[in-house]
Amino acid sequence: MASDGVEVSNKQVIFKDYVTGFPKESDMELRTSTAKLKLPQGSTGLVVKNLYLSCDPYMRGRMTKHDRPSYVQSFNPGQTVTGYGVAKVLESGDPKFKPGDLVWGPTGWEEYSVITATESLFKIHHTDVPLSYYTGLLGMPGMTAYAGFFEVCSPKKGETVYISAASGAVGQLVGQFAKLTGCYVVGSAGSKEKVDLLKNKFGFDEAFNYKDEPDLDAALRRYFPDGIDIYFENVGGKMLDAVLPNMRLKGRIAVCGMISRERIQRTRVRMEGFLVSSYCHLYGKFLETVLPAIKEGKITYVEDVVEGLENAPAALIGLFAGRNVGKQVVVVSRE
């Protein structure tokens, strides 16, 4: 089909303009255009059919205009929203990919995309797990959890671990990695349902609803009377302020999405920002660790799945508001 240059209808989610304050569904709109399923002569890109799209917290930052350099570029007003997703290759000008291959990586929020930056794509070889897992558990969030916990925090058996926003796409995995390592793990989340999930589904030792805690410092002292060895930081603000006095000597804090490194002198705590893109070379090692754990039931994963590209804007805004339970995924097509 693709080699004939067929033109098809192509639904797209368009970013309307830069956002000040909290993003709204109306900052995006659904449009229908046409897409030609053929690459230009000499192109080394891919034509893909998008199957699953990932809603991720970092996308909020892309909806604002940056006055200073950022680790992610802002969306372009009037252009298609972009993010991580799973897609099927229809035509390829890159010898590393062929029609029929399944890939995950950056793509457009649309039914069909032309991807020119093929070096950012990973070919999917393991299809005996749900394909949607490559938006989360086996994709960017999974690598973020793996690199942040094992590479940045260097955990040891018996250490104490605290995770904020623990029921999200990254946090739920960090907690399970910590338990598999033999650590004592506590997570916080924003609802009773999420707290129950942490304790009953993901095997956290303890969990609490931060909204029910008027004094976060007292809450942390209750769960960590001897202090925190590792903090996986997902929220900042008052939570980070409460954690710092509770860190143990030589504690480690992994700060996802920040490129900075700081030592808090009094307790010689190391706080290190990291970007998952710096650890892509470990993806093979990551799969060797995680795939057997999934198949043996040692790692579980919860997804919040929304059907239809037209529902993607609401799903993304819901993520920012904490309405999702687990990894937020949008199904474009199950083919």
Image: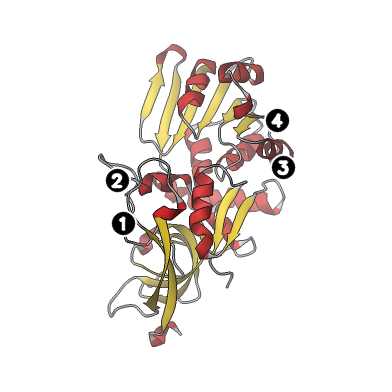
Q: Helix, strand, or loop for circle 2?
A: loop
Pointer 3 residue? 201
Q: The disc labelled 2 sits on which kind of residue?
A: Lys
Distance from label 1 to label 4 (Cα)?
45 Å
Cα distance, mark 1 to mark 3?
A: 40 Å
Mark-to-mark CA distance, 3 and 4: 11 Å
Pointer 2 residue: 65
- The answer to which of marks 1 and 3 sits earlier in the sequence is 1
Q: Amino acid at mark 1?
A: Pro
Picture coordinates of residue 80, whole percent (x, y): 37, 62
Q: Quadrant of residue 174?
A: top right
How far is the residue under mark 2 from the one under mark 1? 10 Å
Q: Which residue is mark 4?
A: 205
Q: CA distance from mark 3 to mark 2?
A: 39 Å
Q: Viewer-nearest of labels 2 and 4?
A: 2
Residue farthest top in this picture: 266
Residue type at numbered disc 3: Lys
Res 4 quadrant in image: bottom left
Type of amino acid under label 4? Asp
Q: Residues within 10 Å of mark 1 (few under 14, many from 20)?
A: some
**Disc 3: CA contacts within 10 A as few (<14), some (14-19) or many (>=20):** some
Q: Which residue is mark 1?
A: 77
Q: Quadrant of the C terminus?
A: bottom right
Sequence-first tag of 3 and 2: 2
